Image (tube, grey):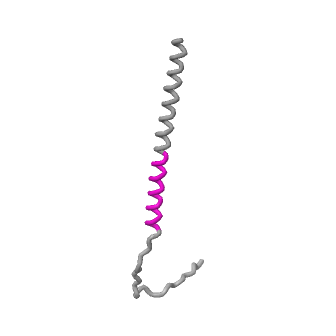
Amino acid sequence: MGLIRILIIIILIFYVFSMIIRILFQHKIKKATRQMQQEFADDYQDTTKKPSNPHVDPNIGEYTDFEEIK
């Protein structure tokens, strides 16, 4: 009777421990996912920003296309 009781206690402890680990793992995954999404959104916003009034120097001149001579 004592052996069965010990086995049941061990099985219950293992079951409870696995449930706790599963819940903690899901929490960590969700937290990491939110953090990665936030970092991606921040990076995306930084790359999509364009200057509202770009400065063009009127003294730059005309573009000249040079051909390579062999």
**In the picture, residue 59 is in which quadrant?**
bottom left
* Residue in the image at 40% along x and 80% along y: 53
**In the depicted view, which residue is nearer to us: 44 or 15?**
15
**In the depicted view, which residue is nearer to us: 38 or 52?**
38
**Up-down relation of residue 50 to residue 62 (above or below):** above
* Residue 11 at x, y percent in the picture: 53, 24
**Up-down relation of residue 6 to residue 57 (above or below):** above
* Residue 26 at x, y percent in the picture: 50, 43
Tell whether position 42 is magenta.
yes
* Residue in the image at 51% along x and 32% along y: 18
**Up-down relation of residue 68 to residue 21 (above or below):** below
* Residue 58 at x, y percent in the picture: 40, 87
Q: Where does the magenta region start and end? A: 29-47
* Residue in the image at 47% along x and 69% along y: 48
What type of secondary structure mainly makes up the magenta span?
helix
Instruction: Return the residue found at the far right.
Output: 70
Quadrant of the rendering where the N terminus is positioned: top right
* Residue in the image at 48% along x and 31% along y: 17
**In the depicted view, which residue is nearer to us: 8 or 57?**
8
